[in-house]
Image: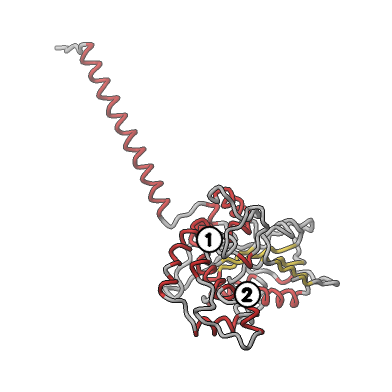
Amino acid sequence: MTRHISKQQRLLLLGCILCIVGCSLILISISQLQYFKVEKSSNAQPTNHILLPSCHPHHRVKSTIQSQSIIRIYFYHVRKAGGTMIRNYLQRVAEQYNIHLQVDEYNHASSKEEVGSQPNTIYITNLRDPVERSISHFKYSERWDCEQLVHNESFMPTQYNARPFGMWNATKGFEPSECDVPFSFTECAVNCYLQTFSGMGCTNNEWYKQYNMAFDRLRKYNLILIYERFKDPTYIQAVEDYFGGIQGFNTPAHMFCGDVSKEANDKVPLSVSEFAHVFKLQSLNKMDERLYNDFVSSCGWNKINEEETKYDFPILDSNRFVAQPNRTVNE
């Protein structure tokens, strides 16, 4: 006996099928969203992070010579981030290979030369946790005047003649800066990375434009050295291999105000009440923190002493360096 399905039943059946298909598509979409959510919070990182020169330095240079020979090193020195030690080491590298060395400091990173603009040049800079760097800067030369500490033997640093840490909270150190004033690293406490690497100094638009400009400029470097890794012997070896095996990276360096400022801060340490301003400094530097973390946290490095960390640094053939008859060193 043949059973006929009414029009109403057919519509109901079609509705059920469409409902099942729709629910399936929704479940698939949810699973895909969950997949991306897991990927975002896992160790997997976007390609643009994996290829950053902090994690994966390279020796590609803008050259018209087929062998891409290296005749020059350019170092933009970020203050209070191991820069003096790095420049001393780069001097050793330049002397070993008899190549040019250019070191720039103080003004914004593109004020004298755009990164990647000169052929046959390796471009290098350095980074440190921005809040730690800012605190170190304050204790080094801003809590007391460096010249006084070094040259005035009668000057006695005390809590009363020290500049208060709570005032070290502006784009120009102790005071806000007009945005058309040229940037200087010697007077900077807040978002110094965004100011120097964007080339724009301070800003009034919540730093987002400067962030993108700073990120784009930083990823053009051949090598970004990270201060927090300098205690790791494996990192030190990776850096030395990068320069063809020349030893001496992380050798202690003499700084103009280094010993006297350390002694002064040991004798007159920051009070507990002053350290409360660290939280404010962290809030003010949130965009610099974001930039720093983009170039460091995404590298997938293990914590020092937890287990051996491997660094994906190339080993440069020393033959790539071509000696220069009229070698120059500009600092």
Quadrant including the N terminus: top left
Q: Pointer 2: residues within 10 angstroms few (<14), some, or many (20+)?
A: many
Amino acid tagged 1 = Tyr
Q: Is residue 238 left or right of residue 114?
A: left
Q: For residue 44, which numbered disc appears in the image?
A: none
Residue sitting farthest toward the front: 160
> Which residue appears at 51% of the width and 78% of the height?
160
Locate residue 142: give its quadrant.
Answer: bottom right
Which of these two is toward me, 123 or 47?
Answer: 123
Along the line of sight, the residue nearer the viewer: 163 or 299: 163
Residue that label 2 marks: 240
* Numbered disc in front, either 2 or 1: 1
Residue 277 location, x and y as percent?
45, 66
Residue type beneath disc 2: Glu
- Comes first in the chain, label 2 or label 1: 2
**Mark 1 Cα shell of 10 Å, populated few (<14), some (14-19), many (≥20):** some
Q: Residue furthest bottom?
A: 153
- Horizontal and vertical percent for residue 295? 54, 60
Mark 2 element type: helix
Examine the rendered structure and indicate whether residue 241 appears above or below residue 266: above
Secondary structure of the residue carrying tag 1 is helix
**Is residue 186 left or right of 100 when viewed as pictured?**
left
Q: Does residue 4 appear to the left or right of 110 in the view shown?
A: left
From the viewer's perspective, is residue 318 above or below residue 48?
below
Residue of label 1? 292
Furthest residue toward right: 325
Residue occupying image coordinates x 81% and y 71%? 328
Q: Position of residue 331 (x, y in %)?
A: 74, 71
